[in-house]
Amino acid sequence: MTEQAQPTYTLWQLVLYMLRLGASGFGGPVALVGYMQRDLVESRRWITVDDFKEGLALAQLAPGPLAAQLGIYLGYVHYRLRGATLAGIAFVLPSFLMVVALGWAYVRFGGLAWMQAVFYGVGAAVIGVIAISAKKLTEKTLGKDKLLWALCLGLAAVTIVTESEVAWLFIAAGVLVWLLRAPPKWFSGRALGIAALDYGAPASMLGGQDLPLLSQLAVFFAKAGAFVFGSGLAIVPFLYGGVVTEHHWLNDKQFVDAVAVAMITPGPVVITVGFVGYLIAGLPGATVAALATFIPCYLFTVIPAPYFKKYGKLPGVAAFVDGITAAAIGAISGSVVVLAKRSISDLPTVLIAVAAALLLWRFKKVKEPLIIAAAAAIGLVLYPLMHS
């Protein structure tokens, strides 16, 4: 990491910037990373280009939400653990408070027609948004690499069939690409050992079913933070598999509404865990879900930060990251199909989803929150007509 004897900004200036970004930064992880580069590197010059690139590489390597991890790393650059901690909290806190407020409104007024109507349109639009996100990630990451394409398609198929995310397959994909592309000297190539992994193991194997509810939430969301790689949307299939399919904490409609809430609020998409936690166990559930999700990504950022510049570019590490990223993209792609079966129920919702995808595909400057807002307005008009 590049050392600077005297930073040109105070820690509190950085904290205030992260608060503003967390409260107003729409567009998902790629947009949030772009804002940080524009503001902190190019405009204010608080962070050097090299430090920013190293932080971005580490955020892509480690599990967890990309933009939040980059913000944590940038806080670490000059102010170490104190800076990383405060920058991370400041970035996540505004959107967390927003989703808790929306969770309260959802529980308090969820039976009202206007809220059902809003999510009727928004839930369909989210499918189009996720579909285009998966397309962009695929084009940017996989290229013409046949091995990565095979892993991506395989994980997409598993996600569609099981309607959940098998976390160990992410690790297996990374190990496979590592052993094939940059094998260590001790590896003979005769056996990959991947068959020893229990692909079908339920997520509950790492946490007991008899634990109190908040303890179950802590275990489950900690796994989400520790095993989800790639875009913030990568957490969607993992959450669906545990929250809906395995534990039955939420039903399909509530889960899609939670994803929609994450799309209409600024900050990291992963903050949907706060809304999910609130629906399950109120404010304590929201707090436990958010802390359990973000603490692993915090640790995965600050612990390796001093060593990443030295080891991050090793061929074996790069190959491992490629495999995990391909698996994450496959899971996101598969989740489009899984969620579409729940969100798209009639012709208007089909048209809303297709329109959202086409707008994002053809018009690069169109922002997701604008599409979500338009879908909400359409839902308010169409829902009463379709359910009268």
Image: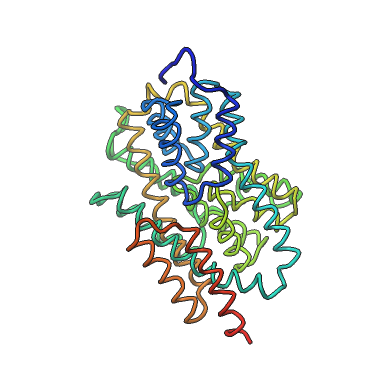
Q: Residue at x 50, y 66 (%)?
A: 339
Q: How is the image coloured?
A: rainbow
Q: Position of residue 144 (x, y in %)?
A: 23, 51
In the image, is residue 172 above or below residue 116?
above
Looking at the picture, does residue 60 appear above or below residue 118?
above
- Which residue is outermost to the left? 144
Residue that extends furthest to the top in the rendered view of this protein: 5
Which residue ends up furthest to the bottom in the rendered image?
388
Quadrant placement of the N terminus: top left
**Quadrant assignment, res 275:** bottom right
Q: Say which residue appears at 68% left-offset and 49% top-offset.
A: 217
Residue drawn at x 39%, y 55% as measured from the top left: 330
Q: Is residue 224 left or right of residue 316?
A: right
Q: Quadrant of the C terminus?
A: bottom right
In the image, residue 252 lies at what x, y percent?
60, 67
Q: Residue at x 55, y 71 (%)?
A: 377
Image vertical order of residue 19 relative to residue 311, above or below = below
Q: Position of residue 55 (x, y in %)?
A: 43, 31
Q: Nearer the viewer, residue 329 or 166?
A: 329
Q: How many marks?
A: 0
Percent across and percent down for residue 95 are 61, 47
The image quarter in which residue 115 lies: bottom right
